[in-house]
Image (spheres, rainbow, N blue to C red):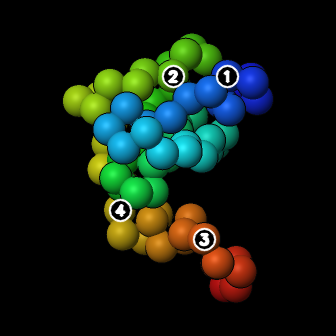
Amino acid sequence: MDKELLAMLVCPLCKGKLKYHRGAEELHCLFDGLAYPVRDGIPVMLPEEARKLSAEEKLHASPGRTGEA
């Protein structure tokens, strides 16, 4: 995904920053706990198209995580 486009995109609900997950082809909003799909390189920024992040996904991506296993 284009870095300039990613810098301009925000969550449509809370207007917060999104984190791109390349493997899942999704944009994650940790505040709302939603994952917006990226289809054919185009972000689908509709809340009704987003899936809810699992508690594990939110915990793993939360700020301050050191990545210990």
Measured from the top left, where is residue 9 in percent x and y? Answer: 56, 29
The residue beneath circle 4 is: 54
Name which of mark 3 and mark 1 comes first in the sequence: 1
Measure how far apart labels 4 and 3 are at the Cα level. 16 Å
The residue beneath circle 3 is: 63
Taking the view exactly as shown, the residue that stands out farthest to the front is 15
Residue at 67% in and 85% down: 69
Q: Secondary structure at mark 3?
A: loop
Measured from the top left, where is residue 52 in percent x and y? Answer: 30, 50
Amino acid carrying mark 1 in the image? Leu
Measure how far apart labels 4 and 2 are at the Cα level. 20 Å
Measure how far apart labels 3 and 2 are at the Cα level. 23 Å
Name which of mark 3 and mark 2 comes first in the sequence: 2
Numbered label tally: 4
The residue beneath circle 1 is: 5
Name which of mark 1 and mark 2 comes first in the sequence: 1
Q: Which mark is residue 43?
A: 2
Residue at 43% in and 39% down: 15
Taking the view exactly as shown, the residue that stands out farthest to the right is 3
Left or right: residue 46 compared with residue 27: left
Say which quarter of the image contains residue 61.
bottom right
Amino acid carrying mark 3 in the image? Pro
Of tags 4 and 3, the one toward the viewer is 3
* In this view, 62 is above or below 25: below
Left or right: residue 5 compared with residue 17: right
Q: Are marks 1 and 2 in contact (CB under 8 Å)?
A: yes
